[in-house]
């Protein structure tokens, strides 16, 4: 089947925060339909829609109660079918979230098919990603069930072939409805070591990340479902190494098209814990992305992302969200979009939305953040210290409402939003999208260049100025042509020899040159040369 996803750009919608059509403060499917022209104009090809399934909403929709029903907050199945029709008429494809490591404890399977879940008479010491034990005692069965996430999200038992077939039947149902692919939530956690040994300090990751049968299960899923449709698949895979990624994405192995790696998202933490902050060392980021670019070239496929619903805003994280917000947002975009792989844009990234700083912990909604706050306060960590970590790394940074205009709540809703808007919506919004110097127009050009230039899709990658702590520079090369990409991650002025070739794209009005390339704060410049 055609590998159309190699030239595609994906746009992620977190529906709860995208656009509210009925004033209840919650984004919905009709709101998405209202904004399809905006996305079509941007030039993206695939919409990744975070979960809209029926859910009690313990983990913002990732706890699914009914896979074949739309959550009331978001609308109806008729709304969803209209969304697919409207998207396909515009040439847009729809990638849904596939959440099959766990369900909600309110799913009918939990009471009627307990064999679909993982039970033990005695728990081991594994900890949940959301704090506390990964095991919860069930009074009715007088046993413990495994939940790697919330205690309301019991893990499915992939050892059970009947359960697997039920999942495959659900997947076929959505694909037959016209869905164009799946983003698979924590899909490399589905296979557990059946001895369930204790982990060091409660970390059981080595016994369920990339577990013993995960490749068997993914190959079976591909054989039974995925191979029968012309779709795109990406696996979210915490703890996956490069060697794992090659196995998952090698076309000959018939598993998934690409994966989300987490390595580059952990480079600004001082230990294994995301809340333990340290400044980013640019050389760490360069080495990491270089490694992935080389390893998957001709042996797999990269997904390229800075942002998603679980990550803070990149312009606040690796850029400058104050004086140089526009420049650094464009620079970060260019740095990513000229690499090999399928790029992902998260809602608001294309207008340079920033992290938020709520004064009170009560303003935060994310279960991971709230559980962490309580756990650290119980340990005596000061409120102010915890809040600093939340301001930098909290998932709610990505979940504040999309900023459409300068009206109340950024035009997201006429009601009260489910989570407060970032107060800077009055000057960061889509009203400037048609301005030639806007971040939106910069992204639009990057998307167009990817479609029109094979070198971006297929070219070799070579890192330049390897030890430079301020500038990320690299080349892409293919028979007959070469791209040279310069990205200044600092507020300094830095000189380099002028690259050969024509200037393809830049984020300042014009180059500053004295015969040398002078990179101003957060400047990017990309050169194209026929060779």
Image (cartoon, rainbow, N blue to C red):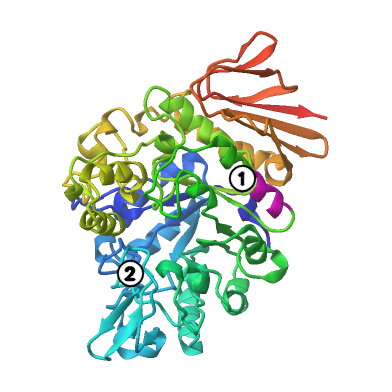
Mark 1 vs mark 2: in front: 1
Residue at the spot x=36%, y=51% of the render?
33
Residue on which the image places disc 2: 63
Residue at the spot x=28%, y=73% of the render?
152
Residue 469 in sight: yes
Instruction: Confirm whether the magenta stretch covers residue 296.
Output: yes
* Depth check, front residue: 278 or 480: 278
Q: Whole-percent x and y of residue 179?
A: 49, 65
What's drawn in magenta, residue-wise? 289-297
Vertical position of residue 156 compared to residue 14: above or below: below
Residue at the spot x=26%, y=85% of the render?
138
Instruction: Confirm whether the magenta stretch covers residue 45.
Output: no
* Res. 145 image quadrant: bottom left
Q: Whole-percent x and y of residue 373?
A: 25, 54
Q: Secondary structure at mark 2?
A: loop
Instruction: Tell me the CA gap for discs 1 and 2.
Output: 32 Å
Residue on which the image places disc 1: 289
Q: Is residue 93 left or right of residue 529?
A: left
Mark 1 and 2 residues: CB-CB less than 8 Å, in contact?
A: no
* Depth check, front residue: 414 or 159: 159
Q: Is residue 398 left or right of residue 9?
A: left
Our reading of the magenta stretch's main secondary structure is helix
Sequence-first tag of 1 and 2: 2
Q: Secondary structure at mark 1?
A: helix
Q: Whole-percent x and y of residue 215?
A: 61, 74
């Amino acid at each position: 089947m055609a590998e159309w996803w190699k030239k595609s750009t994906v746009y992620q919608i977190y529906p709860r925060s995208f656009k509210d059509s009925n004033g209840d403060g919650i984004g919905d499917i009709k709101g998405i339909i209202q904004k399809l022209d905006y996305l079509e104009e941007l030039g993206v090809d695939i919409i990744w829609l975070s979960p809209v399934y029926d859910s009690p909403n313990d983990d913002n929709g990732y706890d699914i109660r009914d896979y074949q029903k739309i959550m009331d907050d978001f609308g109806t199945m008729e709304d969803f079918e209209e969304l697919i029709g409207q998207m396909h008429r515009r040439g847009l494809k729809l990638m849904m979230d596939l959440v099959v490591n766990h369900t909600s404890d309110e799913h009918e399977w939990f009471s009627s098919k307990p064999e679909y879940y993982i039970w033990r008479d005695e728990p081991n010491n594994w900890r949940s990603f959301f704090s506390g034990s990964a095991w919860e005692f069930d009074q009715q069965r007088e046993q413990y069930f495994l939940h790697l996430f919330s205690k309301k999200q019991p893990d499915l038992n992939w050892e059970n072939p009947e359960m697997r077939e039920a999942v495959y039947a659900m997947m076929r149902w959505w694909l037959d409805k016209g869905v164009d692919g799946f983003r698979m939530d924590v899909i490399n956690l589905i296979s557990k070591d059946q001895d369930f040994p204790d982990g060091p300090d409660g970390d059981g990751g080595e016994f369920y990340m990339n577990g013993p049968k995960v490749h068997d299960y993914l190959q079976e899923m591909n054989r039974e479902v995925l191979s029968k449709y012309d779709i795109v698949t990406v696996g979210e895979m915490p703890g996956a190494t490069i060697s794992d990624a090659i196995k998952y994405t090698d076309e000959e192995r018939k598993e998934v098209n690409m994966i989300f790696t987490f390595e580059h998202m952990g480079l600004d933490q001082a230990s294994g814990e995301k809340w333990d902050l340290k400044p980013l060392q640019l050389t760490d980021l360069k080495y990491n992305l270089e490694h992935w670019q080389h390893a998957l070239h001709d042996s797999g496929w990269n997904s390229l992302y800075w942002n998603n619903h679980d990550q803070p805003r990149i312009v606040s994280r690796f850029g400058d969200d104050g004086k140089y917000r526009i420049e650094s947002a464009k620079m970060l975009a260019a740095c990513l979009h000229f690499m090999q792989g399928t790029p992902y844009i998260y809602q608001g990234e294309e207008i340079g939305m920033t992290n938020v700083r709520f004064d009170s912990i009560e303003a935060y909604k994310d279960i991971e953040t709230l559980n962490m706050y309580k756990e650290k306060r119980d340990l005596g960590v000061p409120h102010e210290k915890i809040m600093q970590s939340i301001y930098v790394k909290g998932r709610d940074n990505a979940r504040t409402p999309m900023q459409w205009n300068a009206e109340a709540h950024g035009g997201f809703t006429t009601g009260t939003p489910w989570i407060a808007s970032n107060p800077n919506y009055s000057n960061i919004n889509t009203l400037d999208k048609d301005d030639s110097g806007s971040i939106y127009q910069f992204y639009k050009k990057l998307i167009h260049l990817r479609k029109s230039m094979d070198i971006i899709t297929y070219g070799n990658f070579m890192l330049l100025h390897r030890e430079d702590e301020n500038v990320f520079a690299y080349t892409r090369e293919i028979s007959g042509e070469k791209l040279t990409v310069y990205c200044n991650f600092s507020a300094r002025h830095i000189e380099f020899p002028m690259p050969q070739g024509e200037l393809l794209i830049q984020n300042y009005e014009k180059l500053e040159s004295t015969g040398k390339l002078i990179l101003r704060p957060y400047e990017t410049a990309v050169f194209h040369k026929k060779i």
